[in-house]
Structure formats: C-alpha cells, structure tokens
Image (cartoon, rainbow, N blue to C red):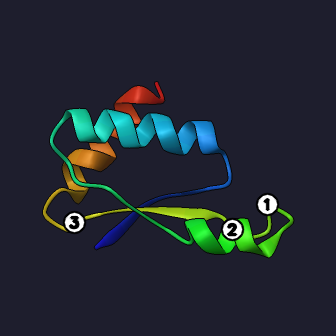
C-alpha cells in the first residue's frame, strides 16, 4: 500500500475515493477512527492508501482532477 493523499478535508477524501473507485481502484482510508477519537478533528489527518500497482494511475487521476 502507498499513501496517495493525506488530508483533514472530508469532502476532498470523499471525492477522491469516489473518483478512484469509479475507475476500479480499491481505496483504504487509514487513521479515520483515530481522527474521530482524538476529538479535535483536525489534529490527525486521514491517509488515503492505494495498492502499489494502482498508485501511478491513481496519482495521475488525482493530478488531472486538480487541474
């Protein structure tokens, strides 16, 4: 697994997750529960992870979407 994105922005994470899943890329979100349990909400960013084989494609899709 490789980290594609690290963010506290739930809308951004949701959008990127949806975009990648529509392309058949499996997404795992790490630190989601820790971010909630921490209490301050923004102290621990969530990490969006993809497989190493999908990383380049996912990275290119993310870059295209941000243009």
- Nearer the observer, disc 1 or disc 3? 1
Q: Residue at x 65, y 64 (%)?
A: 45
Give the mark nearer the N terminus: 1 vs 3.
1
Residue 8 lies left or right of residue 53; in this view the side is right
Rounded to the nearest angstrom, the CA distance separating label 3 from label 2 is: 22 Å
Q: Position of residue 54 (x, y in %)?
A: 17, 56
Q: Quadrant of residue 39?
A: bottom right
How many numbered dots are placed on residues in this image?
Answer: 3
> Tags 2 and 1 in contact by the CB under 8 Å rule?
yes
Q: Which residue is drawn at 56% across and 39% down?
A: 12
Q: Residue at x 78, y 74 (%)?
A: 38
The residue to which callout 2 is attached is 35
Q: Where is residue 40 in the image (x, y as percent from the top left)?
A: 86, 65
The residue to which callout 3 is attached is 51
Could you tell me which secondary element the residue under label 3 belongs to? loop
Rounded to the nearest angstrom, the CA distance separating label 1 from label 3 is: 27 Å
Q: Position of residue 55 (x, y in %)?
A: 24, 58
Residue 41 - label: 1
Rounded to the nearest angstrom, the CA distance separating label 2 from label 1 is: 6 Å
């Amino acid at each position: 697994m490789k980290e594609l994105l690290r963010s506290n922005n739930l809308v951004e994470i949701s959008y990127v997750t949806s975009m990648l899943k529509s392309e058949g890329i499996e997404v795992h979100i790490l630190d989601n529960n820790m971010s909630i349990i921490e209490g301050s909400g923004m102290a621990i960013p969530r990490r969006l992870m993809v497989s190493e084989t999908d990383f380049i494609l996912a990275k290119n899709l993310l870059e295209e979407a941000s243009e």
